[in-house]
């Protein structure tokens, strides 16, 4: 997808500010303001601050449908025995990389971003009126709170990666109230709560993981 960037850039001391920022990727456009400060004090960390509005972002269209499947091998001529192609191991896809994750980088700078979107979705889920806070401080990366409308229901979530300790810790919490799964062109049932039920999440998820 073609990428376009338009902004009004200003410099003041050790700070750079991008006002009226507009980033276009295909049919998607991101707007907002960003400020990057590189402190002059010894030992102080750089800081990225700002507000970003994702507009209506179709993640499925942005990422595409994935890589094309390899073409099938031509059939063997008549009368010749059929042999299986050699097993090179290239068809085996790793779920997690064997290389260590670069958590040390999270300790080298800080972030404070407000993120909003009118609609943020994939092929199976559409989040409307999306709002989230992304912060990074002293090696702790947080995406919290995360609030959105899911059909007639609501989504509340939070997550963080604590890279200030070893092993690093990941925690994710998701609560869904009366949600329905909605696409960019349709709607399908996903989660309903009985009118008599108490006010509690009809779907929830909480996972904590440690990485070395």
Image (cartoon, rainbow, N blue to C red):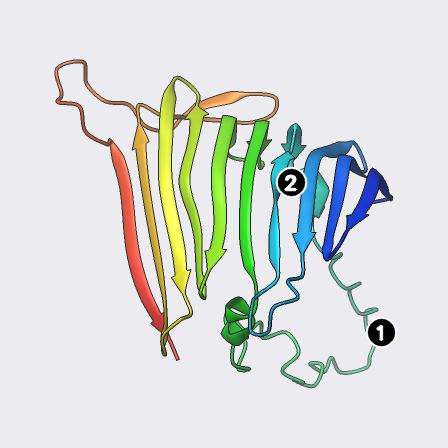
Q: Position of residue 109 (x, y in %)?
A: 57, 64
Frontmost residue, 66 versus 179 = 179
> What is the crowding at mark 1: few (fewer than 14 residues within 10 Å), some, or many (at least 20)?
few
Q: Viewed as shown, does residue 109 lie left or right of 166? A: right
Residue 162 image position (x, y, % from top left)? 38, 65
Q: Residues within 10 Å of mark 2 (few under 14, many from 20)?
A: some
Judging by the rendered image, the residue that carries numbered circle 1 is 78
Choose top left, top right, bottom left or bottom right for residue 31. Answer: top right
In this picture, is 139 found above or below 141? below
Residue 14 in which image quadrant: bottom right
The answer to whether residue 39 is above or below residue 48 is below
| Residue 60's disc number | 2
Closer-to-camera residue (112/193)? 112
From the viewer's side, name the closer residue of 205 and 189: 205
The residue that appears at 67% across and 61% down in the rendered structure is 38
State which mark lies toward you, 2 or 1: 2
Residue at x-position 80% and y-position 69% = 73
Q: Is residue 49 left or right of residue 176?
A: right
- Left-right relation of 112 to 91: left
Residue at position x 53%, y 47% in the image: 112
SS at circle 2: helix
Q: Are marks 2 and 1 in contact (CB under 8 Å)?
A: no
- Nearer to the camera, 111 or 174: 111
Instruction: Locate the N terminus by quadrant.
Output: top right
Q: Residue 84 appears at what percent x and percent y?
A: 69, 81
Q: Earlier in the sequence, mark 2 or mark 1?
A: 2
Residue 6 picture quarter: top right
What is the C-alpha distance between the residues marked 2 and 1? 44 Å
Q: What residue do we see at 84% from left, 69% from top?
A: 74
């Amino acid at each position: 997808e073609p990428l376009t960037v338009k902004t009004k850039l200003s410099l003041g001391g050790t700070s750079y500010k991008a006002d009226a920022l507009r980033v276009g990727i295909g049919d998607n456009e991101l707007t907002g303001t960003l400020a990057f400060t590189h402190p002059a004090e010894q030992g102080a960390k750089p800081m990225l601050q700002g507000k970003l509005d994702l507009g209506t972002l179709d993640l499925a269209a942005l990422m595409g449908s994935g890589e094309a499947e390899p073409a099938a091998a031509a059939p063997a001529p008549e009368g010749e025995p059929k042999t299986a192609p050699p097993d090179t191991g290239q068809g085996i896809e790793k779920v997690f990389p064997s290389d260590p994750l670069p958590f040390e980088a999270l300790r080298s700078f800080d972030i404070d971003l407000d993120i909003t979107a009118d609609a943020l979705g994939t092929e199976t889920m559409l989040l409307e009126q999306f709002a989230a806070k992304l912060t990074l401080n002293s090696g702790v990366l947080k995406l919290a709170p995360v609030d959105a409308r899911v059909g007639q229901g609501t989504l509340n979530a939070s997550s963080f990666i604590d890279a200030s300790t070893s092993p690093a810790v990941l925690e994710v919490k998701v609560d869904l109230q009366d949600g329905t799964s909605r696409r960019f062109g349709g709607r399908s049932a996903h989660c309903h709560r009985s009118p008599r039920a108490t006010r509690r999440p009809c779907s929830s998820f909480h996972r904590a993981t440690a990485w070395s």
